[in-house]
Image (spheres, rainbow, N blue to C red):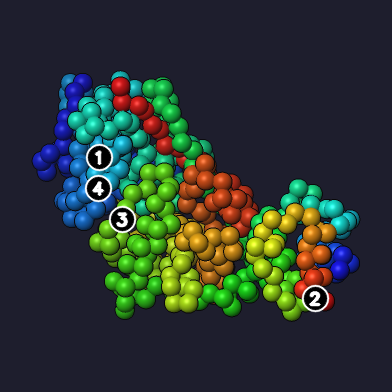
Amino acid sequence: MQVVEVKGKKEQSEFLAFRKRRYKNDALYIDNNYFMLQEIFAKKLHFVKSVNIHPVMVCDESGEVLCEAVIAYAKDLPEYIQICFFESLPGQSEAVQLIVSRAEEKGKYYKCSKIVIGLFGHVNYGLGLLNSHYDSVNSFSSQGNPKCYNEYFESLGCETVLLNSYFTHNLEDRLSRYGALIRKLRRNYEFKTFDKHKFEYYSKIYTDLNNACFTEHKYYYHREYEDDMEMLKELFLFMKEDSLFFAFKDGKPVGFILWYPDYNELAKPGELFGTKHFFLNKLKGKNIRTAKVMEWGVLEEYRGCGLPVALTDCVYQTLKTNYRCSQVESSWVLDENEDSNSICMAICDGKYKEYIVYEKAIG
Amino acid sequence: MLEEVKKILAEEYRITDVTRDTDFKKELGLNSFDFMNLICIAEEKFNVELEEEKYRNMSTVGELCDYLESLVK
């Protein structure tokens, strides 16, 4: 077997086709990353300007692809060389080892000290391989992978970083025990939704809050305004303005929460997520049962007053009034982040899926 | 004041069997939002404003009662 660097259009097509074949008959996975990969290959994303991309495939003697990944180096996360968008056939530990070795070579070139597996370029595009619930379909923008992926990296003696997601089965009265707190916060803070007529203004607020709230978080690195503008433009093809709430104190943005319906409920397992689902959502108004809270953040100086509860309440009130979603799944929270896990335990029913990131020191 | 606080805990959290020494977190299992909510209820009930610096490190029912009493007087 050999490692093939994906440089031309032909190899890029092969790379994408492998991914498509991999999940075509998989009843437990809806691919939300296919179109992002297409855009990465086409160098359409502003985000790619700050990331060096090295897609690779491992092929057998007959040229069949056995596994593939994008090896990425983000200039603002210089400690790590990333193995992202990893896909493989089962039973290919030898081929996977070749990808890891290639990542190690690239890492040495860029003077990185570690390989990280499960980071998708930037945490805002995804973090973690699935590490539990292998028998359930992935929600929109969450990872779904067979257990053998984890076994590949565990067998290489990688260190692990765990992530949790949380679930709330019934929104009715879920936050009523915090009623007085919410009333006070609503008196003292102003809550506004995103306004598409002031797209740039609100998008910049979102970027500034991300950079201020998450700078100290593991794997996070500075976002450019253009990165989020292009990400939000794509998300707003699907989501409405009330998917992004901001908290203001005396006119100053101090917190936000981003959520959207689990659009994967519109897709059949094994499908690529795309235009068809956009129309199912926009035109046919298909019912989506689950909402997904993707991220929330509060400036450090405004933490400790309960703002996450009020922001979550904004979402729950919107879900009750404008949507038919009756349950909520959270995105990942780093297991080491005690504050965020405590908040999730307080506002959600309990832990749900576990995700995992692998790290390997470069020798 | 102890009776008033006990009444709030019973109505809001169905918690009974409370003394001045009862610890909000360790014995009653209140999370930080529950505690902040309790503070807000007390503010509404007694029409006072509690200072965060004063209540941030409170652990027992008695400490809250004493602080409320000092404000309500």
Q: Considering the image in quadrants, where does the N terminus of chain A appear? A: top left
- SS under mark 1: strand
At label 3, the amino acid type is Arg
* Measured Cα–Cα span from mark 4 to mark 2: 63 Å
**Mark number displayed over residue B72:** 2
The residue that appears at 21% across and 55% down in the rendered structure is: A45
Cβ atoms under marks 1 and 2 closer than 8 Å: no
Please, what is the three-letter code of the amino acid marked with disc 1?
Ala
Give residue B18's position: percent from left, percent from top.
Answer: 87, 57
Q: Which residue is mark 3?
A: A223
In this view of the protein, can residue A92 be seen by the observer?
no
Dot 3: few (<14), some (14–19), or many (≥20) neighbours within 10 Å? Answer: some
Residue at 53% x, 66% y is A311
Q: Nearer the viewer, mark 4 or mark 3?
A: 3
- Gap between marks 2 and 3 measured at Cα: 49 Å
Tag 2 and tag 3, C-beta contact below 8 Å: no
Q: What distance separates the C-alpha of mark 1 from that of mark 2?
A: 62 Å
Q: Which residue is mark 4?
A: A37
Which callout, 1 or 4, points at the residue further toward the start of the chain? 4
Residue identified by numbered label 1? A72
Instruction: Indicate the amino acid at tag 2.
Output: Val
Dot 1 and dot 2 within a common chain: no
Judging from the image, mark 1 belongs to the subunit labelled A
